[in-house]
């Protein structure tokens, strides 16, 4: 699938590509806004600068996707207040308001980045060409965020394992429930407000993707992220089993 | 799961054998106020999850000693057990073995299909797990001892009986062949690998054992008084077996009820029972325990437990064709020492009624 070089792209392919780029841009803007909000709450100057740098990194990802979408004349719809993206943002802001740096890191760098890395990789491999390369390159950068946060969270776990696991569990159910509903075979909480027409999940096959596979891979990467941080397997399996499907 | 768990004597690597079992398992992990997920919903996540520990197991010996272990689920898709998925399944088993090592388990049991996945390549596990066992020696001796007991119960004289072994060249099948070669009137052998089957036949002939073989069981079944099915085939048919033939379903999964028809006396073989009992933490037994009697476990899993009780942390059952009758008797005796013996006879309909 090469959106730019192929003017004879079918309507179905055009629509699904437009929706994928719309989701990616919205997701990156959410990430940018999250880090910007986090920067406001941090007192430590170095951490503050790091948060701003992360926000800029997400901004550049969004710009990269926007530039490609413009070149390919895709129909882009950005909506950061829809039922899924909007609620994830609300969750983040509630922790940012409490100046809970660790909670913000868990939401943005573990939960959202696991899904971003996995889904960008799947999309990149399926699309190929310039669009595919763009998704794969951004997935690589997001992977670095995920790995960096794992180091910080491992240290937090070591300091007070029981408190850390309890906090993580609460955030998991607050935030991963939304992502699980969002990525279920059918939208469990209605239309996302980002896709142009009907939900794109049923059309992913036009570019060789499958929602079950994408959701499964994303959950697998999230589970691996939990393992890397040091969450016990017997905990993480229950957390995942209790998510909506 | 950063550091090794203290005092972890053994780990069991396993998988669920059907989507029905998986649904029960997953739903037993959900809160009571949550809706039950259907198998179709669970399929969207379960087979993607990387291997991990799911619950702890505490086992009690007849002498009061306790050992601690852990169950590690591979999340192998029960619809993808065929050869075409061998590579992906093997990766899952290897990752599960690495997980067991990371947890500090002193011996690892390859339960159910996980040892079949590695058959012919079991040594690969040694690169990631400290000590492991396929558990096939105890499974084989439980099949043998149970058949001997069932034969006595049903008035079948083993020395006058013909024994058919389906899957005769596999690790468990060949162990049973050698165990019974001088104890029955004749052996009937069946296996998919014709070359290995002919080699086994030649070796038995040299020992003057009365033996016949065939590629498919159909032509041998009518002559068999006792049948051991140690093959994991779903299309097996035993409908022309003798009325009152004794059938031990020792394959994986155990699914011979329909194939054997109503006349056969069928039981699920290779299973053991722990008199001291065992407990899971968290207790998912409501979702995963489906046996007709208490404290029943697959022999392959029990083997690691027996070895752990004996503090014999070593590679015990290591692969195809290495099981000797002496080793079968050894592990059986060690199990008995700890109150671990063959399970009561049962099949899909429940426990056998007293004869």
Image (cartoon, grey):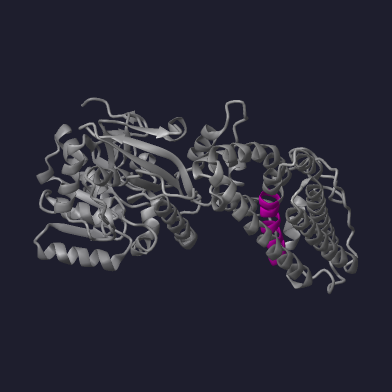
Look at the image and say whether residue A120 sits in the magenta stretch: yes
Quarter location, residue A134: bottom right
Instruction: Measuring from the top left, give residue A73's x and y in whole percent.
Output: 91, 65
The residue that appears at 70% across and 64% down in the rendered structure is A141
- Give x and y (percent) for residue B308: 27, 45
Depth order, front residue of B333/A96? A96
In the rendered structure, the answer to whether residue A57 lies left or right of residue B91 reads right
Q: Residue at x 34, y 57 (%)?
A: B130
Side of B291 relative to A118 (left or right): left
* Above or below, B235 relative to A121: above
**Quadrant assignment for the C terminus of chain B:** top left
- The answer to whether residue A118 is visible is yes
- Image quadrant where residue B16 sits: top left
Q: Is residue B152 above or below residue A78?
A: above
Residue ID at (19%, 58%)? B212
Q: Count the marks.
A: 0
> Residue A83: horizontal and vertical position, in percent?
81, 40
In the displayed structure, B61 sits above or below B333; it is: above
* Residue A155 vs residue B7, the one in the foreground: A155
Rendering coords of residue A146 (x, y %): 65, 56
> In the displayed structure, does residue A41 sit left or right of residue B39?
right
Taking the view exactly as shown, the residue that stands out farthest to the bottom is: A5
Nearer-the-camera pick, B180 or B1:
B1
* Residue at the image position 25 percent from the left and 63 percent from the top: B197
Q: Is residue A145 magenta?
A: no
Q: Main secondary structure of the magenta part?
A: helix
Magenta region: which residues?
Answer: A109-125
Instruction: Say whether residue B220 is visible.
Output: no
For residue A167, side relative to residue B139 (left or right):
right
**Dividing the picture into quarters, in which one does residue B190 lie?**
bottom left
């Amino acid at each position: 699938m090469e959106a730019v070089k192929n003017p004879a792209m079918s309507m179905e392919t055009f629509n699904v590509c437009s929706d994928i780029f719309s989701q990616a841009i919205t997701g990156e803007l959410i990430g940018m806004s999250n880090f910007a909000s986090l920067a406001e709450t941090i007192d430590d100057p170095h951490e503050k600068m790091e948060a701003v740098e992360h926000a800029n990194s997400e901004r550049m990802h969004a710009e990269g996707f926007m530039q490609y979408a413009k070149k390919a004349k895709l129909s882009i719809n950005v909506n950061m207040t829809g039922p899924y993206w909007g609620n994830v943002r609300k969750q983040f802001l509630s922790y940012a308001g409490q100046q809970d740096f660790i909670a913000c890191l868990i939401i943005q760098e573990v939960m959202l980045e696991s899904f971003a890395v996995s889904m960008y990789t799947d999309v990149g491999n399926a699309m190929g060409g310039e669009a595919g390369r763009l998704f794969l390159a951004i997935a690589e950068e997001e992977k670095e965020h995920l790995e960096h946060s794992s180091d910080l969270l491992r240290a937090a776990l070591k300091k007070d394992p029981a408190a850390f696991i309890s906090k993580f569990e609460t955030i998991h159910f607050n935030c991963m429930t939304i992502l699980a509903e969002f990525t279920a075979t059918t939208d469990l909480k209605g239309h996302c407000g980002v896709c142009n027409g009907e939900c794109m999940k049923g059309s992913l096959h036009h570019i060789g993707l499958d929602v079950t596979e994408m959701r499964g891979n994303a959950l697998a990467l999230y589970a691996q992220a939990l393992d890397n941080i040091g969450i016990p397997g017997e905990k993480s399996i229950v957390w995942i089993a209790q998510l909506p499907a | 799961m950063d550091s090794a768990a203290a005092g972890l004597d053994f780990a069991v690597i396993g998988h669920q054998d059907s989507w029905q079992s998986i649904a029960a398992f997953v739903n037993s992990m959900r809160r009571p106020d949550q809706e039950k997920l259907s198998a179709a919903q669970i399929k969207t996540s379960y087979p993607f999850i990387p291997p991990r520990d799911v619950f702890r197991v505490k086992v009690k010996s007849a002498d009061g000693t306790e050992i601690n272990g852990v169950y590690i689920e591979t999340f192998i898709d029960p619809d993808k057990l065929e050869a075409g998925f061998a590579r992906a399944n093997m990766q899952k088993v290897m990752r599960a073995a690495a997980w067991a090592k990371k947890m500090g388990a002193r011996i690892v049991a390859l339960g159910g299909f996980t040892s079949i996945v590695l058959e012919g390549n079991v040594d690969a596990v040694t690169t990631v797990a400290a000590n492991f066992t396929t558990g096939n020696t105890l499974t084989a001796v439980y099949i043998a001892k149970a058949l001997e007991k069932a034969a006595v119960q049903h008035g079948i004289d083993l020395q006058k009986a013909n024994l058919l072994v389906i899957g005769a060249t596999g690790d468990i099948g060949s162990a049973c062949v050698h165990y019974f070669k001088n104890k029955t009137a004749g052996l009937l052998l069946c296996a998919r690998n014709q070359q290995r089957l002919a080699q086994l036949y030649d070796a038995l002939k040299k020992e003057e054992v009365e033996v016949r073989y065939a590629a498919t069981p159909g032509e041998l079944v009518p002559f068999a008084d006792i049948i051991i099915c140690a093959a994991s085939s779903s299309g097996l048919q035993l409908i022309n077996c003798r009325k009152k033939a004794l059938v031990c379903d020792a394959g994986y999964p155990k699914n011979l009820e329909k194939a054997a028809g109503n006349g056969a006396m069928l039981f699920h073989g290779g299973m053991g029972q722990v008199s001291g009992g065992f407990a899971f933490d968290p207790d998912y037994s409501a979702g995963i325990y489906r046996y007709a009697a208490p404290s029943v476990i697959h022999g392959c899993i029990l083997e690691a437990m027996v070895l752990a009780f004996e503090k014999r942390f070593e590679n015990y059952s290591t692969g195809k064709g290495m099981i000797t009758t002496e080793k079968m008797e050894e592990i059986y005796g060690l199990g008995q020492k700890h109150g671990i013996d063959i399970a009561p006879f049962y099949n899909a309909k429940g426990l056998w009624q007293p004869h």
